[in-house]
Image (tube, rainbow, N blue to C red):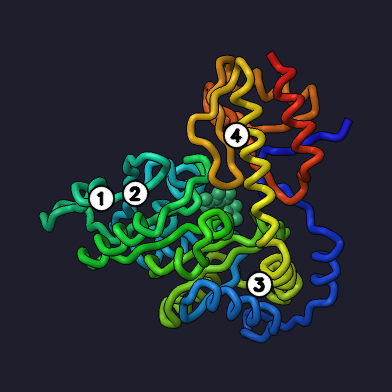
Amino acid sequence: MELIDLRSDTLTKPTPAVREAMARAEVGDDVYGEDPTVNKLQNVVAELLDKEAALFLPSGSMGNLISLYLQAGRGGEVLTHQDSHILHYELASGSAIAGCQILGLPGFRGILTPEVLEPALRGPIYYNARTKLVELENTGNLAGGTCYSLAELEAVGAWARGKNLPVHLDGARLWNASTATGLSPAALSAVADTVTVCLSKGLGAPVGSVLAGTKVFIAEARRVRKMLGGGMRQAGIIAAAGLFVLENHRERMADDHEHARLLATALNSTSWAKVVVLPETNIVFADTTLPAQVIVTKLQTKGVLCGAMGENKVRFVTHLDVGRTAIDRACAILGKVS
Ligand SMILES: Cc1ncc(COP(=O)(O)O)c(C=O)c1O
């Protein structure tokens, strides 16, 4: 039985065309700044996000950490959503390595607003932590792949500028947000001083993320990347995959979003699941009547893999390696579980 793996969009395997692009990559030593393919990828992403410069990294977590290290630092406080990836899935690296504290704030659909940010800002009393950075996530992973509207982004941006606070955007799935909203990656990044984007999620590259910002920031980020052990040598091999998927896999993301909607409809037709936040992109969360782990096991025996994300919550993520036929099969299987 062929398993339909909907646990995450990070599970994709490089296609033959991606492997071909990797095999053909021109390379050099990137620690010397001499890998032409890495340099090209950095330029392409900087341009797509309308930032001065960019830096290729092994992971999105490293991009977020470098941003926190440089913009919040020891004793600084980062304001973010209480469901954000930096708060739940990055090993407290903000505090362990960057030395900052992260404050998680509420907000419907993972969206931060000035109304929630304002009371969280620390006053100038000497024993307070110093609010140093606002961190947004778009799409919001734990929120269910939700997207900020331009108005929501601009509201946070105006608030942060008014307080002299920089904004970091965790855009691990910014490409999905762009596809879903029809807004360009640059428009979605305009609010942010620094942006992390991932090539290894919905785009389907095997590895890699890119951090973008001003030239001065990226020069510093290069130092911190090396300090974290992230200086890579002939990284053009993997950067080539990133360039290929940016050019060839962005448009098809609309299929993933359609597949997520089909799964949500199928889930809402069952007696055991309820999708409250309907998917805007490629992530579907369902509340379950049975314990999540029981559902995961039942589905697994029928050939569908999903993730338990809490006592009574399961997550399905659509991606490049699960096509329409498999999605139709998965929907039929969802209807057979009771
Ligand atoms: C929203 C978000 N940010 C950051 C990351 C971290 O990316 P990486 O796994 O490349 O470190 C992830 C990973 O899934 C994510 O979902």
Image coords of residue 246 (percent x, y): 67, 67
Quarter-wise, where is residue 4 in the image?
Answer: top right
Quarter-wise, where is residue 179 in the image?
Answer: bottom right
Q: Quadrant of the C terminus?
A: top right
Cα separation, mark 2 vs mark 1, equals 7 Å
Mark 4: secondary structure:
strand
Q: In this figure, which residue is indicated by the disc labeled 4?
A: 315
Give the label, 3 or 1, closer to the camera. 1
Disc 3 residue: CB within 8 Å of ligand 1: no
Of label 2 and label 1, which has the lower sequence position?
Answer: 2
137 w.r.t. 218: above or below = above
Q: In this figure, which residue is indicated by the disc labeled 1?
A: 117
Cα separation, mark 4 vs mark 3, equals 34 Å
Q: Tell me if 125 is positioned left or right of 152 in this view.
A: left
Cα separation, mark 2 vs mark 3, equals 35 Å
Cα separation, mark 2 vs mark 4, equals 22 Å
Q: Tell me if 312 is positioned left or right of 9 in this view.
A: left
Q: Amino acid at mark 1?
A: Leu
Q: Residues within 10 Å of mark 2 (few under 14, many from 20)?
A: many
Q: Amino acid at mark 2?
A: Leu
Q: In this figure, which residue is indicated by the disc labeled 3?
A: 232
Q: Mark 4 and mark 2 in contact (Cβ < 8 Å)? A: no
Mark 3: secondary structure:
loop
Disc 4 residue: CB within 8 Å of ligand 1: no
Image coords of residue 212 (percent x, y): 49, 72
Give the label, 4 or 3, closer to the camera. 4
Q: Tell me if 336 is positioned left or right of 138 in this view.
A: right
Q: Mark 1 and mark 3 in contact (Cβ < 8 Å)? A: no
